[in-house]
Amino acid sequence: MTTVEPIRQPPPAALPPPMRLREIVFGAARAASVRAAVRLRIADALGDRPASIGELAAAVDVEPDPLRRLLRSLACCQVFAETEDGRFRHTEMSRLLREDTPGSLRNIALWCTEPWTWEAWPLLDRAVRTGGCVVNEIYGKDFFAYLHEDAPESARVFDAAMTTSSRQSATDVADFLDLDGVKEVVDIGGGQGHVLASLLEKHPALHGALLDLPQVVAHADPRLRDGGALASRATLVPGDCRREVPVEADLYIIKNILEWNDESTRRTLANVVAAARPGARVVVIENLVDNSLSSFTTAMDLFLLLNVGGRKHTEESMVARMTEAGLNVTDIRPVNGALHAFDSTVPPKARHQHR
């Protein structure tokens, strides 16, 4: 009986330096291959048993020979695996490209390889030289204006990717936060409100507000909207935290939004401090480039430089921004392998200093 063990590839670390460098500079081919697999829905078409190229080609309506070449390239980095009899099967990573997999990274894979990225990455040297984003230069407008006015499909991919990321971390954040003594919480720039919804579900006496742009809160988590299971304890507040935070609460959560650029970060923190009553807690939750378990966060740091002139923070830079805003940082702890939480309080004098 034929075995279905995958053909073994040497681990990257076992390759000599010249080959390792070749692997790195061909990274665009790997990223493009993952994107192609997602757009062709190959992972969705492949079931639990190994399939032949003919079967897969028929299922996704492509030519067999180019499909084999694509899958062999992906199998070299453990996205799918080729069996000794020439069929292909799933791996842990390829299953993450399926739409129905819990924790699917399908939308993230698409977002990181959208058409605009192939125009922006070659200009990274210019962004490093000037310290500014290049998207404005390419398209003549800021990144989000470009997305919503000129690239609606990319805008939909962005929204789906952010929803995926938020849903995957919401439960971890809700389990992490100690809400002893907290009656009211505000999620600042919280997108569709997955973190807020998870907190309200976990704490039945808690009330909360979601502050984000009007077009964002209009599509908030159904649990938070009129008729939703949590609507009686949730308030949707349309607005821009960079301009004003019109809500008082015991706890303010600011998750993964202090990365656009330094001026936006300063304005957001100052507005929170100005709105908060003395003694209120402010918890900032971010990916840190100096406490990351993978190169993904450092790559995202460069991604932000290109598209919005932003950055991922180090522990030191995040504490500096919060302290500058008048916050007293009291604790820094990991939420999970990707996120760190900075717990802080608003001192009595800070409110008056920033008004």
Image (tube, grey):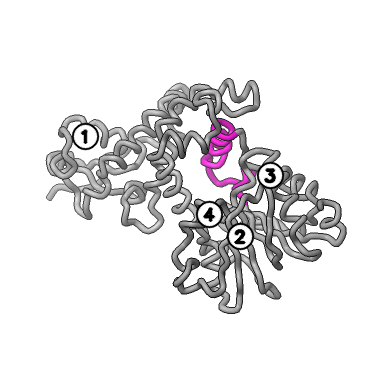
Amino acid type, label 4: Gly
- Residue at mark 4 to residue at mark 3: CA–CA distance: 17 Å
Based on the picture, tell me whether residue 187 belongs to the magenta stretch. Answer: no
Looking at the rendering, the stretch of residues picked out in magenta corresponds to 286-308
Q: Residues within 10 Å of mark 2 (few under 14, many from 20)?
A: many
Please tell me whether mark 3 or mark 1 is closer to you in this view.
3
Please report the residue visible at 19 percent of the width from the left and 42 percent of the height from the top: 60
Looking at the rendered structure, the secondary structure element under dot 4 is loop
Q: Is residue 251 left or right of residue 102?
A: right
Q: Amino acid at mark 2?
A: Asp
Q: Which residue is mark 2?
A: 187
Q: Is residue 34 left or right of residue 246?
A: left
Q: Quadrant of residue 253?
A: bottom right
Mark pair 2, 4: CA separation: 9 Å
Do callouts 4 and 1 mark residues in contact (Cβ within 8 Å)?
Answer: no
First reached walking from the N terminus: tag 4 or tag 1: 1
- Residue 265: numbered disc: 3
Q: Which residue is mark 4?
A: 191
Residue 16 visible at all: no
Q: Amino acid at mark 3?
A: Thr
Q: Name which residue lies at 64% across and 66% down.
A: 185
Q: Is residue 292 magenta?
A: yes
